[in-house]
Each structure stands twice: as C-alpha cells, then as structure tokens.
Image (cartoon, rainbow, N blue to C red):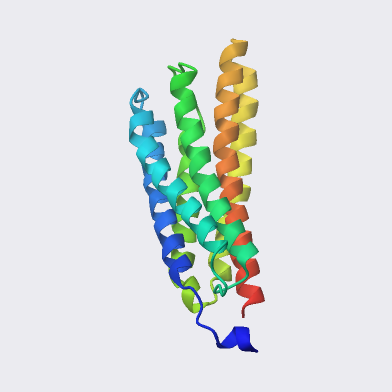
Amino acid sequence: MFKKLLPKEEKYFEDFKEIISFIRQAATITQDFFKSESYDPDIYLKLKPIQNRYDEITSRVVKRLNKTFITPFEREDIFALVKKLNAIGNNLFGAAVRVDTYNVTTKIAGAEELMAIVLLQINELENVLQDLRHKRENINDCKVVQDLEAEADNVYRRELKKLFLEEKDPMEIFKKKEILEILENACDKCQSAANVIIHILIKNS
C-alpha cells in the first residue's frame, strides 16, 4: 500500500520516445542507403553518431533502473523494452556497415523492401510509445507490427531463394545472405518490442 502512494519516476516515457526517434532517424538513413543504385561509402559516419545516442539513452535507463524505487511499470518490462528498441537500431547499423566492410558493389535485391517494412514497423512503435504514459489501448497498432514481420519473412525467403538460384559467386551469396538476414532480424526485433508493449498494456490495464 505504501509503495502505491509514492510518486513514480516518469522520465522513462521520455526516454522511450527519444530512443525510438533516433532509431527512426537511423532507419530513414538506412532505407535511403539501400534504395541507392550505388552504396554510400560514408554510411558509417552518418549512422555512428545516431547509434551513440540511442546507446547512451539505453545506458541511462539501465542506470536509473538501479536507482529508482518506484517505476511506472515493472522494471523488468522497462529493461526488456529499451533493450529491444536498442537492438532494432543495432541491426540496422550492422546491415548497412557490412555492405561497406564486405565491399558489396551490386544492389542487394530485397534489402530496400525489407527496410521499407522496418520503417513502417518503427512508425507504428513510435505511435504506441507516444501514448504509453497514458496506457491507452494500442494493442491493434502493436499487432500491425506483428503482421508486418510476417510480411518481412515472406520477402526474406523469396529473395534468399532467388539469391541461391541466380548468384554464381559463393562469396557474394554469403555476403548478401548475411545482410538480408540482419535486416529480417531487425523486423523480428520490432515485433519483439511490440510484444513487450502488449505485455505491459495487458498487465497494467
């Protein structure tokens, strides 16, 4: 009873909105990168400062969790959500940087389509996180994220099949397969974040 009367630390909601904002920025840059007919060699310089920002926010949240007595919802849920959001950004960063690291010079079929799906998922997550403080029912928006992940699975399988059928160079297969896999995993991470939010909404309704 005493715990319920104490004021709750509300800064976490601002952290969620800030981190998803930076991840959206990273996703927009990454989508433009994979859209291009020739890949930008300076992609690392464009994405690294943004990655640093959402990493800083993640670290800040984790440190605050160790000090805050009363949180707006269970601390393990806050930890899970911020980690899932951070993982989305790290997957996007990893996919784009590998293009440069592996010296991929031809466009990766399916990468642009997967990035379009990721960006749609991030936009839905951003909408949900805007209202999470007020615990409005946004479960339907979260389900949109889940449906989009299923669409990403189909794109990934289709493009992987084409890659193995059409590409003759084993090293090119390896490089492009890994990059497509990382992008598809970014879609999975969006779904995981949506699942955490659904769990929070149900538990706190």
In the picture as drawn, the residue positioned furthest to the front comes out as: 67
Asked whether, in this view, residue 60 is left or right of residue 189, the answer is left
Identify the residue at the far top of this view.
169
Q: Residue 28: percent from the left, percent from the top?
A: 37, 44
Which residue corresponds to the image point at 57% horizontal and 52% vertical from the top-left? 83
**Front-most of 64 and 138?**
64
Q: Viewer-proximal residue, 154 or 14?
A: 14
Check the picture and name the quadrant holding the N terminus.
Answer: bottom right
Vertically, is 11 above or below 97?
Answer: below
Residue shown at the point (63%, 42%) measured from the top left: 153
Residue 15 lies, in percent from the top left, at 44, 61
Q: Residue at x 55, y 43 (%)?
A: 186
* Whether residue 114 is visible: no
Viewer-side residue, 204 vs 118:
204
The quarter of the image holding the C terminus is bottom right
Name above or below for residue 138 compared with residue 179: below
- Vertical comparison of 188 with 74: above or below: above
Residue lying at 62% horizontally and 12% vertically, measured from the top left: 170
The answer to whether residue 133 shows anywhere in this view is: yes
